[in-house]
Amino acid sequence: MRAITYTQAGGPDVLQLTELPTPEPGPGEVRVRLAYSGVNPTDWKSRSTADPGDSGKTPDQDGSGTVDAVGPGVDAGRVGERVWVWEAAWQRATGTAAEYTVVPTHQAVPLGEHGFDLGAALGIPFMTAHRCLTVAEELPDRIGPGTLEGRVVLVQGGAGAVGNAAIQLAHWAGATVIATISSPRKAQLAAAAGADHVVDYTTQDVVAEIKKISPRGVDAVVEVSIVANAAKDVDVLAPHASVAIYADDGGTEFTLPVRALMGPNARFQFVLVYTAPATAKGHAVDDITAALAAGAIRVGEDAGLPLHTYPLADTAAAHQAVQDAVVGKVLVDVTA
């Protein structure tokens, strides 16, 4: 099979198009003939720093395709099933930048008749967003219609992939969604995703604008850049609010005022899907599946998530695009 591999950590140039034996599924596993691979920031960061091992590694966690073989203990009826794949490369060598990948059966989730491009855009972004919206004790542990009714959610960086996912899920759950962005173009994308209010942090006073919208503050913050936004987050938290930090864009260390956060019993929670509890991941998969069935998750320009697609041989360019923070979702067309 054709596959992208790398044998040493480094820049996108370490990625090479190679021929590998088609993997066989083991007990409890399925093999997926991939249509698309989805590229996330953790994919290029891992490629840049992590030792791929003596035999090399195929990158990318997310993907979509069709189950074409199953291992012992897996229902043979899964063969032919259209699926989306998550965490394919987590502690494994067979990521999704290849014609085939092998994953545990629960990591190949039924996609139904939804597009493969949509399926490859789910995985890490939507599971991260789900965790951010459910991680605190005062938030529901499931996302569905009405579960966030009466809550105000602030999405810092509403035009990113996780930001877009958080907007779509929170909107579906009935929250009032405020998104911060940095340009008119990104404002259009956040609104298309379902944000009720959009604040441009380059031209507006974020705290003042949020307090106009919700004088009591916000119940949950989905945070991409805590170093830049910590002071603003503190100023807009409602009682018992949470800040879920899923990235370190803009810096790796920040400070918080103790007394200002004790009164509202505020919570700052760090989020990394890969090491999240298995129960939380299972809830995320189930709720994303329900949102798909309800038509609540979309991709593309009209959903606030432009798609940028590269052929398999240009996976290095796809990784570079994500590293350069292109606006939208980067996919690799494995069949091209």
Image (spheres, rainbow, N blue to C red):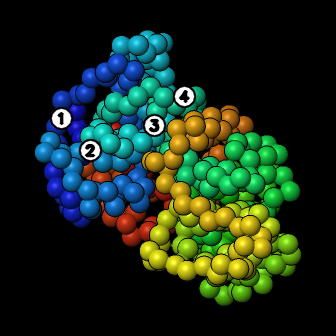
Q: Which residue is mark 2?
A: 58
Q: Position of residue 308 (x, y in %)?
A: 45, 57
Neighbour tally class for label 4: few under 14, some 14-19, many 20 plus, Cα within 10 Å = many
Q: Which residue is mark 4?
A: 110
Q: Position of residue 224 (x, y in %)?
A: 55, 68
Vertical order, 245 against 79 (above or below)? below
Give the amino acid type for the residue marked by disc 2 in the picture.
Answer: Thr
* Circle 2/circle 1 CB separation < 8 Å: yes
Earlier-in-chain disc, 3 versus 4: 3
Give the amino acid type for the residue marked by disc 4 in the picture.
Answer: Pro
Q: CA distance from mark 3 to mark 4?
A: 9 Å
Q: Which residue is mark 3?
A: 85
Circle 2: element type: loop
Give the amino acid type for the residue marked by disc 1 in the picture.
Answer: Leu
Q: CA distance from mark 3 to mark 2?
A: 15 Å
Q: Nearer the viewer, residue 207 or 194?
A: 207
Earlier-in-chain disc, 3 versus 1: 1
Neighbour tally class for label 1: few under 14, some 14-19, many 20 plus, Cα within 10 Å = some
Q: CA distance from mark 1 to mark 4?
A: 27 Å
Q: Which residue is mark 1?
A: 20
Q: Which mark is residue 240?
A: none
Q: Nearer the viewer, residue 21 or 247?
A: 247
For the point 70% across and 80% down, the residue is 259
Earlier-in-chain disc, 3 versus 2: 2
Give the amino acid type for the residue marked by disc 3 in the picture.
Answer: Val
